[in-house]
Amino acid sequence: MTTQVKKLTLIGLILMIFTSVFGFANSPSAFYLMGYGAIPWYIFSAICFFIPYALMMAEYGSTYKKEQGGIFSWMNDSVGPRFAFIGTFMWFASYVIWMVSTSSKVWIPLSTFIFGGDKTQEWRLFSLTPTQTVGILAIVWMIVITFFASRGLKQISKVTAVGGIAVTGLNLVLLLVSVLIIILNGGEFAQPITGWSSFVESPNPSYITPLATLSFVVFAIFAYGGIEAVGGLVDQTKNPEKNFPKGVIISAIIISVGYALGIFLWGVSANWLQVLSGKTTNLGNITYVLMYNLGFELGNAFQLSATTAASIGTWFARITGLSMFLAYTGAFFTLIYSPLKTLIQGTPAKVWPKKMTQMNKANMPEFAMWMQCLAVIIIILLASFGGDNASAFYNKLTLMANVSMTLPYLFLAFAFPFFKAKTGLNREFVIYKKKWQTYLGTIVVLIVVGFANVFTIINPSLNGDYSSTIWMIAGPVVFAFVAYILYESYLRRMKNNR
């Protein structure tokens, strides 16, 4: 007796893509960096990156659905094992950088929940600076999470999923409260709209030049991250040839409109110069700064006292802090082992020292997890003891994470024409039916992602911040070099054993 697996309808597919990709914290960062000027870039990234890239992932995923190696299998079969290994290692490295960034930034929502605001810039352990103190706390966080996760304590991610649901609910809070504020304020926006220039120019003095504006595209691309998972949904979709491309395009429209609306709504309650121009506001705490201000302006709109309005703002920030802390914790418990396990089990076993591939009683690569923890700790120490103030430190970590998370897209996009040229594959789902479509989609994605990363890396150095530029270059170069050495030594061992 065969069991019928329920297939995803078009609506179900759109919901799956939306929940995988849309992130509440992306619109506050966008408004902080570019104001309303972020909106066109989010729409541009949906058209020139999200749609063509998601459809590429769908073709890969449906063709190699029985392969266990994930993206390594895709690139290995399309281009070759060396390219596939380096590409997959770079994909894994992006999660290492994400852990460096998040283990440091996770203390901001916790501080906001406990104290009602970001106090991490005032924390001091002994004679350490606030940045160094956060670095030490990040190391403690990594050790604790690695210890529990390596023992298979994954149930915590189910508890912290509540945080994910609460974060999703914050979108509704932003919408309803902003509508209420604008009605009570007689249709006035805190951030005035002075014509089309408001949607092109940034109020942020760091994002006025054309190069700085173009570097913002990385943030827009990052906001559409998570679409690799979309490839696995093709065979779960009803009538995929018709529904999947339609689902991807409709999702892109809904997500980009959602981001555009979110950015637009922040302008209802927040005037950029009055609220966001302070030295203590940064890419680590921007969400909580804006949520506090949203609550504060709601109180003002109801003409409550300054103390009551501030109290409402504090509770908006506290609830956001708790929601984000739980969401970060849940994501951490999954991402601390999942990419590592995929790397070890998806690539040739003999690339790795035997101990790296061994699983413990909880079926976790415990030794590999501690090696990963050590790598993260070394990077945290180098970054946090580099002499930056807290705001510069958080901004640097965010830029590093954005660049490292978007670079693997270049490997997968570059491999796509080679994948299309392969014969003898069982292609159940094909969107790029002509050669020119394949090359156009590939070139557009490579140009958009490639140049966005180049501009992001160069931009800080033009303002005298050579440290951020060096860190953004050093991370990918070091990890690519490690991957190359690992694979070349594997080839030498194989050759000597023949």
Image: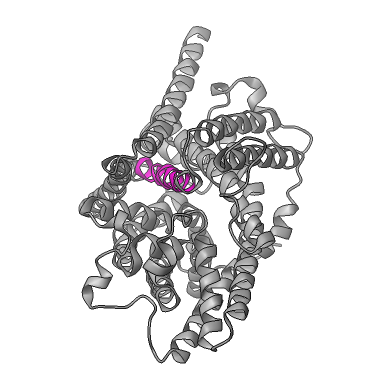
Magenta segment: does it hold 145?
A: no
Residue 128 seen in render: yes
* Location of residue 183 (image quadrant): bottom left
Q: Left or right of 49: which side holds 167? A: right
Q: Which of the two residues, 333 or 107, is positioned nearer the viewer here?
A: 107
**Residue 223 picture location, percent across and down:** 43, 58
Judge whether 435 appears above or below 367 on screen: below
Coloration of the structure image: one colour
Q: Residue at x 34, y 45 (%)?
A: 413
Residue 246 seen in render: no
Magenta segment: does it hold 409?
A: yes
Q: Residue at x 31, y 48 (%)?
A: 449
The dominant secondary structure in magenta is helix
Judge whether 246 appears above or below 433 on screen: below
Q: Left or right of 156: which side holds 374? A: left
Q: Which of the two residues, 482 or 56, is positioned nearer the viewer here?
A: 482
Q: Residue at x 43, y 31 (%)?
A: 86
Of the 4 image quadrants, the one containing the N terminus is: bottom right
Residues in magenta? 394-412
Q: Residue furthest right?
A: 361
Q: Which of the two residues, 229 or 96, is positioned nearer the viewer here?
A: 96
**Residue 482 picture location, percent across and down:** 46, 24
Total number of numbered labels? Answer: 0
**Residue 98 picture location, percent across and down:** 52, 44
Judge whether 352 appears above or below 272 on screen: above
**Residue 295 picture location, percent across and down:** 56, 76
